[in-house]
Amino acid sequence: MSYGRPPPDVEGMTSLKVDNLTYRTSPETLRRVFEKYGRVGDVYIPRDRYTKESRGFAFVRFLDKRDAEDAMDAMDGALLDGRELRVQMARYGRPPDSMYSRRGAPPRRYGGYGRRSRRSKSRSRTPASNRASKSRSRSKSKSGPKSPGNNEAEP
């Protein structure tokens, strides 16, 4: 079972993503249920980095692709801990190690978890006074405002 890092020999394994788990489902329970279909190389349940609770899904790695396919066919829709599981082939591998350079935490991209930024959500960072004057000068036509009465041609 993997609690943070994959085992070193995951290269040839086939991963299944198991969704709709309860927060109390353990890696041991998943291993026991999925081993009925073949040799399980690893079970990984991602946890919330702040609360350390399960995020409600897991990855089960099989040593043989056919065993993984059998498990997926049998377990998709099966009940575990009162929940109907959704099982599918995992689409992507783990993110590269460079993502986890800060002691296991991926880089922050959007200003933190659950915090609101004090900065306005505008796209430009130029001061409001400069932005307003530039946008006004661009939107005005040099010949002045047009009104419906000014569209007549001169004789």
Image: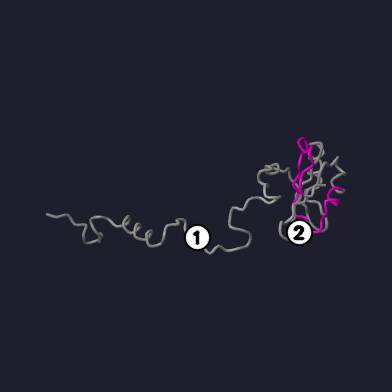
- Pointer 2: what residue? 53
Q: Amino acid at mark 2?
A: Glu
Asked if the residues shown at circle 1 and circle 2 are in contact, with their CB atoms under 8 angstroms apart, the answer is no
**Position of residue 55 measured from the top left corner of the image (x, y, whole percent):** 73, 56
- The structure residue drawn at horizontal position 17% and vertical position 54%, both measured from the top left corner, is 153
State the extent of the magenta-drawn residues as a range. Answer: 4-31
In the shown orientation, is residue 137 left or right of residue 154? right
Q: Rate crowding at label 1 as few (under 14), some (14 to 19) or many (20 or more) other CA atoms within 10 Å.
A: few
In the rendered image, residue 81, in percent from the top left (x then y), is placed at 83, 57
In depth, the one of 105 and 26 nearer the eye is 105
Query: Which is the main secondary structure of the residues drawn in magenta?
Result: loop
Residue 57 forms part of the magenta stretch: no
| Quarter of the picture holding the C terminus | bottom left
Tag shown at residue 121: 1
Q: Is residue 79 above or below residue 34?
A: below
Element type at marker 2? loop
Q: Tag 1's secondary structure? A: loop
Occupied quadrant, residue 38: top right
Q: Earlier in the sequence, mark 1 or mark 2?
A: 2
Q: Residue furthest left?
A: 155
The answer to which quarter of the image holds residue 154 is: bottom left
Q: Could you tell me which residue is drawn at 38 percent across and 58 percent down?
A: 131
150 or 52: nearer the viewer:
52
Density class for disc 2 (Cα within 10 Å; few <14, some 14-19, many ≥20) is few
Residue at 63% across, 50% down:
107
Q: Check the image and report above or below for 65 versus 149.
A: above
Q: At 53% across and 64% down in the image, what residue appears?
A: 118
Q: Seen in the image, is 104 located left or right of residue 81? A: left
Type of amino acid under label 1: Lys
